[in-house]
Amino acid sequence: MVVPADLPHPLSLPRPLAELPAPAEPSRTDVRVALGRAADGTLADDPEHPATLADATTLLAARGEELDALLGLAAARRDEHLAGEGRPGVVTYSPKVFVPLTRLCRDRCHYCTFATVPGRLPAAYLERDEVLEIARAGAEQGCTEVLFTLGDRPEERWAAARDWLGARDLSTTLEHVEQSARAVLDETGLLPHLNPGVMDLVELQRLRGVSPSMGMMLETTATRLWSQPGGAHFGSPDKEPALRRRVIDDAGRARVPFTSGILVGIGEHRAERAQSLLVLAESARRGGHLQEVIVQNFRAKPDTAMRGEPDAEFDAFVAAVAVARLIMPLGVSVQAPPNLAGDLDDSQSAADDQALLLRAGIDDWGGVSPVTPDHVNPERPWPGLDALRAVTGAAGFTLSPRLTIYPRYVREPNQWLHPDLVDPVIALADQQGLARPRQPAAAR
């Protein structure tokens, strides 16, 4: 296994990032100057002139004509990315099912409705047979991916989790994840994608044997949102930014194709948002493992501590998508969730917002499931594939399914895949490394 030499030591946290003051609002001239530097192509690929925090922070303030110009630059960068990946004009999505393995968590994120308490659940975890039932339903509908969504190490907070695991001779949640993912591989042929939260290098290497890809959102580098009362992540040990930065770098060391991203609108200011994107871009360059970056907008949910907070302002969110595209190295996909766009009761507003996200440079819509809801955002139904295909087509792109692992990693299986996973991945991949067409059972 080749280990990038310049990654931090795996047993230490990355050096702390400086706390950033809230930036002043830039003038339109400031934004135009930053746009000029972005147009020169120096934000992502020139090692002598890397993107600066000042430029990225300024571009995040683009509005009106300047925002239109920013979107144009990002769209051109996306098209360059797609050409380099061998799929010009193709925007992707992953046909998947979601497995909420456990909704217990030791963290207390103030915007989350996924995590709950034992008394509100029929059981602390899904049984392996329940996982397989969901996976088989996905296989019947032509899915290729099983996304394992769960809370961080609930056994360290909840006796119900410890008791459930102990009754099955399991010591940790991650053991249950590993065994369930292996059962999915062996019995359905679908590919697990694991989001179990914070892991160390040994755990990443172990789970690499049952999952072609994994993920964990960075969310934000703003330590104050974790350390200060009232912050979105206060009381959540696994949301310490330095800890999450280490996990993302460790995934590169373990040669795991990885998904990460940021949340927009959880209390961070523009400089902190820019810093978060720069951290992800730097990790992508060091490890070569960051296959996609998700830029996700905060939507307030009832029954949470942040239920009274405003949703992320959409122009600010779109600007963040565009800046992410300009900052990320070529080869890193940029994704935005289609079900968080628009108003719930207005399909046209959703289509309009999705079209704007395409203008901002995304090349992937993430997972869309014909079987299961988005368990993290259950109040936001998935768009129908026909509707998503229409929006994508109107923007001049073809919508195509992909695997949980992106084509560039499919093409280098000996470097990026555990030997046990090469055949399962190749069995589902077409010649481009995207997903081989799979018809729902009713259409076969």
Image (cartoon, helix red, strand yellow):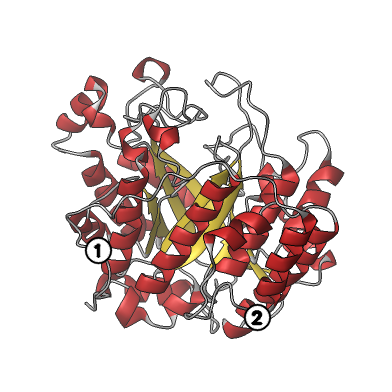
Q: Position of residue 176 (x, y in %)?
A: 25, 43
Q: Is residue 146 left or right of residue 385?
A: left
Of badges 2 and 1, the one in the foreground is: 1
Q: Is residue 424 left or right of residue 167?
A: right
Q: CA distance from mark 2 to mark 1?
A: 31 Å
Residue 35 circle label: none
Figure check: 393 above or below 168:
below
Would you name the residue on which mark 2 appears?
80
Earlier residue among tags 2 and 1 = 1
Residue at horizontal 32 percent and vertical 61 percent from the top: 249
Name the amino acid, label 2.
Glu
Mark 2 packing: few (<14 Cα in 10 Å), some, or many (20+)? some
Residue 294 occupies quadrant: bottom right
- Judge by depth and name the residue closer to the eye, 399 or 52: 52
Residue at horizontal 86 percent and vertical 45 percent from the top: 348
Quarter that holds the N terminus: bottom left
Q: Position of residue 21 (x, y in %)?
A: 51, 42
Residue 8 circle label: 1
- Judge by depth and name the residue closer to the eye, 18 or 234: 18
Mark 1 packing: few (<14 Cα in 10 Å), some, or many (20+)? some
Element type at marker 2? Answer: helix
Residue at horizontal 30 percent and vertical 81 percent from the top: 414
Name the amino acid, label 1.
Pro
Figure check: 394 above or below 96:
below
- Judge by depth and name the residue closer to the eye, 229 or 87: 229
Quarter that holds the C terminus: bottom right
Q: Is residue 204 left or right of residue 133?
A: left
Q: Position of residue 322 (x, y in %)?
A: 67, 61
Element type at marker 1? Answer: loop
